[in-house]
Image (tube, helix red, strand yellow):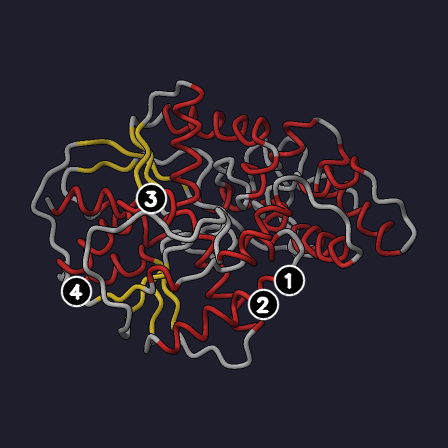
Amino acid sequence: MQCASCYYKGPIVPHNWRELPPFEWSPPNKKCPSYEYFKFRAFSPVGRGNLASIVFDDPNFPVTDSLIKIVYTCTGCGTCSEICKAHDPWTVIWALKEYLTSRGIKLPNPLPKLFANIENCGNIFGTEKPPPVNRNIPKKGRDVLFTGCFMRFTQPNLIETIIYVLRKAGLNLAWLGDEELCCGFLPGQQGDIDKMEKQAQQNVKRLREAGASRIIVSCAHCYKALRDYYPKLIDTFPFEVVHISEIYARLIEKGKITFNKKLQKKVTYHDPCFLGRHSKLYNEPRAVIESIPAVKLEEMERRKQWAYCCGSGAKAISLCYPDFSFSISKERLLEAKEKANTVVTSCSSCVLQMRRAAAKLGVEIYVQDISEIVAEGLE
């Protein structure tokens, strides 16, 4: 199909005669971040779909640097598949990455090094020991926190914040600490499903040994991997996987988290792609924010299923194509700035990306993880 609804300007037509409110079927003019940046149809979902049909059909089709750039500058945001349910372009692009990887193509730098880091050290940074966390956390328990590479190695204070909030709510939380391994989301999303499966097997083994029955995740990428991909890769996956915003929402509803501080500030909320569009978790983070006294939530125009990518691009864009990544971040930060001086999100990758971009680009906006604003409301 060549209808261009997945990338071109203007609204789309509701398919299958569905009666839908305008917000659901009228996405913003800017839909596909890579098409907006590179300005060529080849970088659109339709362009990549056409490329996939050619590559799948001809095993001798030359895999050039240009082809790799077109395929691997897809941010994975999933907006195209939100629009086009029939063809699910994002999944086609992911399948193309998997096929190219099976042909032994050279991935964009620094992905080969990062995958080697996962293989050798169990994390994308290639470091044996993450920064210390200043809380005594048991390694075994029914509720186990899964932090992910970005939080463990760049945001140890966020781990401390989560532990503080949940202990205050009466939850006895365990954490594997140095025993936790990369979830495998990054290689999996870039086509190396075998590597993601290997990480899944190792992590599931360690979680079983820890006595886990419920896994609490803060990173949207880890959440997607553990909740949706692991059960497809592991024969028996006995864990409940919940996002930290879901836990906060439940604890607030039960009266286990009660706020005693009025923050008196206006915030806007950024939907992480893999928490929102890919996992359909929109309401819980907003309910948590709105339950904090004197906090006013101002929504951006592009929100929920039409939220724009933060620039991380499933981690790969920020690591492989930084100029492209920062251009996306700038647009999103300026959109947030129109509504509030603070943008709250619920993914450690989004937090890191937007903080780096705000500092680099000089956008004066405060970026907070949802756990940080919850802790702020407690004390």
Front residue of 3/217: it is 217
* Distance between the alpha carbons at the discs numbered 3 and 2: 26 Å
First of labels 3, 4 by sequence position: 3
User: Are discs 1 and 4 less than 8 Å apart at CB?
Assistant: no
First of labels 3, 2 by sequence position: 3
- Circle 3 packing at 10 Å, graded few (<14), some (14-19), many (20+), is some
Residue that appears at 58% across and 48% down: 78
Q: Nearer the viewer, mark 3 or mark 4?
A: 3
Position of residue 346 measured from the top left corner of the image (x, y, whole percent): 36, 47
**Residue 12, located in which quarter of the rendered image?**
top right
What residue does disc 3 label? Answer: 155
Residue that appears at 19% across and 55% down: 135
- Circle 1 packing at 10 Å, graded few (<14), some (14-19), many (20+), is many
Position of residue 285 measured from the top left corner of the image (x, y, whole percent): 32, 50
Front residue of 267/299: it is 267
What residue does disc 4 label? Answer: 254
At label 4, which amino acid type do we have?
Answer: Lys
First of labels 1, 3 by sequence position: 3
The residue at the far top in this view is 362
What residue does disc 2 label? Answer: 197
At label 2, which amino acid type do we have?
Answer: Glu
Residue 349 in sight in this render: yes
Residue that appears at 43% across and 24% down: 334
First of labels 1, 4 by sequence position: 1
